[in-house]
Image (cartoon, grey):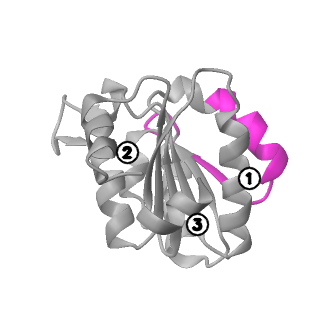
Amino acid sequence: IKKELNNNKVVLFKGVTSSGKTEIYIELIKEIISQELNVLFLVPEIALTTQLVSRLQGYFPTNLHVYHSGINPNLRYEIWNDLNHNNKPKVVLGARSSIFLPFKNLGLIIVDEENEVSYKQFESRPLYNARDLAVYLSKQMNSKCILASATPSIESFNNSQIHKYS
């Protein structure tokens, strides 16, 4: 995975549930953090953040932020401000809206369960797909991007077949 991330930057990572994908993410995040770079870890549902927080806090106790529409506005402002003004590397675990945070030195974006329709914003404007924005943002910021799923989307699978993604 490291080799492919260094070659293509966008990697489609297919792994069944409970196959150890999160452990691989943690090792990659450690490496990126050691390079003084930030990490964005996207999950499709707010409910999934609570499952991952306890695991990630064990590894990144001082530089983990959880960001989604369910947290209070004051905390959202503090996270925004911290990312905007603090150069210490951070890991942001969040739902689709976290794609719009003011990242500097973004080294890695992980889109877990990239096939989920929850990454698409349908209800209000702006209408967007956070998975597609993650790929775009990784290109703009010259960062690595992992799209992970047990059942990849047709678009991502096709992009891997035509070697646009590894």
CB atoms of marks 3 and 1 within 8 Å:
no
What residue is disc 1 on? Answer: 27
Q: Disc 3 or disc 1, which is closer to the eye?
A: 1
Q: In the figure, is residue 165 to the left or right of 24?
A: left
The disc, 2 or 1, on the residue closer to the chain's N-terminal end is 1
The disc, 3 or 2, on the residue closer to the chain's N-terminal end is 3
Q: Does 63 appear in magenta?
A: yes
CB atoms of marks 2 and 1 within 8 Å:
no
Q: What residue type is labelled 3?
A: Asn
Q: In the figure, is residue 128 to the left or right of 28?
A: left
Label 2, label 1: how far apart the Cα atoms are: 25 Å
Q: Which amino acid does label 1 sit on?
A: Glu
Could you tell me how many numbered marks the image carries? 3
Label 3, label 1: how far apart the Cα atoms are: 14 Å
Q: Give the range drawn in magenta.
A: 50-71
What residue is disc 2 on? Answer: 97
Q: Is residue 102 above or below residue 70?
A: below
Q: Does 156 appear in magenta?
A: no
Q: Is residue 130 visible?
A: no
Q: Is residue 20 above or below residue 111?
A: above
Task: Looking at the picture, tell me which residue is in the foreground, 166 or 110.
Answer: 166
What residue is disc 3 on? Answer: 38
Residue 158's image quarter?
A: top left
Task: Looking at the picture, tell me which residue is in the foreground, 19 or 62.
Answer: 19
Please state the horizontal and vertical placement of residue 156, each as a whole percent of the image. 31, 39
